[in-house]
Image (cartoon, grey):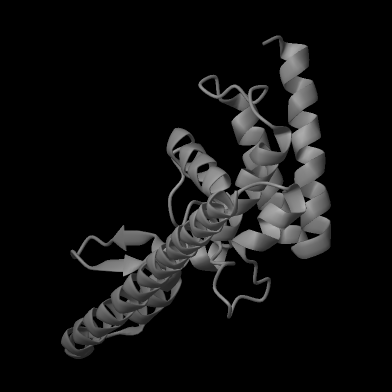
Amino acid sequence: MTKAEKTKRLDEIRQLVLAFCEEHLSEELAGYALRLCETLGRKQKISITRGSKEIWAASIVYVIARLNFLFDSESEFFLTADTICDYFSTKKSTIGSKATYIENVCNIGLGAEGFCSPKISDSLTLVELPNGFVIPKSMLPEFKFVVEAANDEETKELEEFMAEQQRHKAREIAEKKDRHAEINQKIAKDKKRKKKENDKELGLFDLNL
């Protein structure tokens, strides 16, 4: 793979991703997808010239959709895996596997900065304070303001309040992760069901022969 070949393929993938985003996603989400394209282009372990450019583009969109909970029907830019696959003429099992591969190679997980909204990133990123409290990053400015305003008598109540807030945020994070897992399980069940239906149709076809 020459540098020119890699640059050409990366540009082709980028154009496919951009076209999809212009039709289905926001400018912000498109920015995350394009950033992931650039990240892949810099990875030595990944050969983007191997395999279909449509599969690479679909998988990049799939990663961004997963990180930003776009498969959740309550999302403003709700997507289904079928929407992505139909657009790029790919299979869900293929892009699901490729998306996971991309996340692993690029070391991208839930809340990864630069690939999802700051609100999602901050809510999923935990920060440990000097006093031992562990809180979501999104609560940090508020926490600092409240601590500075408190006097000695209020400190105990403040700590109890923040502990409860910490537990509440932890529950929210756990619920989001559970929802993420439920969506992946549903996708897996749909694939399994469709495979059974296809196998059954093939069996009937063989009998008719």
Residue 205 falls left or right of residue 170: right
Q: Residue at x 67, y 11 (%)?
A: 1
Q: Residue at x 51, y 21 (%)?
A: 45
Q: Nearer the viewer, residue 32 or 54?
A: 54
Residue 53 falls left or right of residue 159: right
Q: Is residue 168 visible?
A: yes
Q: Please, is residue 22 above or below residue 99 in the view?
A: below
Whole-percent x and y of residue 109?
Answer: 43, 50
Whole-percent x and y of residue 98?
Answer: 53, 40
Q: Is residue 67 visible?
A: no
Q: Nearer the viewer, residue 184 or 104?
A: 184
Q: Please, is residue 88 above or below residue 98 in the view?
A: below
Residue 12 falls left or right of residue 207: right
Q: Nearer the viewer, residue 83 or 46?
A: 83
Q: Nearer the viewer, residue 24 or 169?
A: 24
- Residue 118 lies in what quarter of the image? bottom right
Whole-percent x and y of residue 96?
Answer: 52, 48
Q: Residue at x 24, y 84 (%)?
A: 164
Q: Please, is residue 162 above or below residue 174 in the view?
A: below
Q: Residue at x 67, y 48 (%)?
A: 33
Q: Please, is residue 19 above or below residue 103 in the view?
A: below
Exactly how many numbered labels are in the figure?
Answer: 0
- Residue 34 lies in what quarter of the image? top right
The furthest residue to the top? 2
